[in-house]
Image (spheres, rainbow, N blue to C red):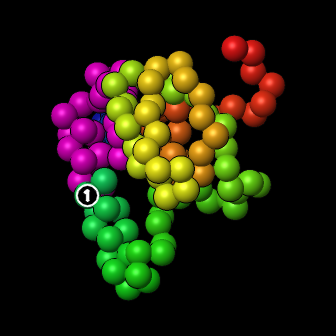
């Protein structure tokens, strides 16, 4: 009886650890889709080396798959874009991270992204920066 109880406790602990590991892996996968490959520094400090390695390999896998889709569809399909269709093509954004420099947009040419400035830009040009947290999308009700 004692050996059976001991074995059952070991199996239960093993199941709990595997469930916890699977939960963390799913969180890392979700983080990759939310941030479009940029692992935030505050999150990186909370991960083990194996989890960072998993995240890096998962990112490479998605990037490779995404580029193969782009080749087959003339670059039209991007898995990192928002899953819901945008309500409007142009968005108002505020720069919340310094050091972004200048971006070149299809519609507005060169735009200098200096900390604290706001811009009205095409969603496609800045959505990756919004996902990374470098730009904050404004809904028109914020105070300056």
Q: Residue furthest right?
A: 141
Residue 32 part of the magenta-drawn span: no
Q: Residue furthest top?
A: 144
Q: Is residue 59 above or below residue 72?
A: above
Of 48 and 36, the residue lying toward us: 36
Does residue 95 appear anywhere in the picture? yes
Of 109 and 87, the residue lying toward us: 109
For image coordinates 43% across by 44% down, the residue present is: 110
How many C-alpha atoms fall within 10 Å of the one at disc 1: few (<14), some, or many (≥20)?
A: few
Of 110 and 10, the residue lying toward us: 110
Does residue 21 appear anywhere in the picture? no
Q: Secondary structure at mark 1?
A: helix
For image coordinates 74% across by 54% down, the residue present is: 88
Quarter in which the N terminus is drawn: top left
In the image, residue 61 lies at what x, y percent?
Answer: 28, 62
Q: Is residue 86 above or below residue 141?
A: below
In the image, residue 16 lies at what x, y percent?
Answer: 43, 38
Q: Which residue is mark 1?
A: 60
Of 64 and 90, the residue lying toward us: 90
Horizontally, residue 59 falls left or right of residue 76, namely left
For image coordinates 51% across by 46% down, the residue present is: 126
Residue 48 part of the magenta-drawn span: yes
For image coordinates 41% across by 81% down, the residue present is: 74
Quarter in which the C terminus is drawn: top right
Magenta stretch prevailing secondary structure: helix
Q: Is residue 137 above or below residue 71?
A: above
In the image, residue 107 lies at what x, y percent?
Answer: 55, 56
Q: Residue furthest front?
A: 109
Horizontally, residue 23 falls left or right of residue 83, namely left
The magenta stretch spans which residues? 37-58
């Amino acid at each position: 009886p004692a050996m059976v109880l001991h074995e059952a406790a070991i199996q239960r602990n093993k199941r709990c650890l595997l469930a916890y590991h699977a939960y963390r892996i799913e969180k890392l996968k979700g983080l990759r889709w939310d941030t479009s490959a940029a692992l935030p520094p505050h999150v990186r400090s909370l991960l083990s080396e194996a989890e960072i390695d998993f995240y890096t390999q998962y990112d490479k896998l998605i990037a490779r798959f995404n580029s193969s889709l782009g080749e087959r569809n003339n670059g039209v399909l991007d898995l990192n874009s928002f899953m819901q269709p945008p309500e409007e093509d142009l968005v108002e954004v505020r720069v919340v991270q310094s050091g972004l420099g200048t971006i070149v947009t299809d519609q507005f040419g060169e735009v200098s992204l200096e900390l604290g400035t706001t811009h009205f830009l095409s969603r496609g040009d800045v959505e990756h920066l919004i996902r990374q947290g470098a730009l904050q999308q404004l809904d028109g009700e914020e105070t300056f």
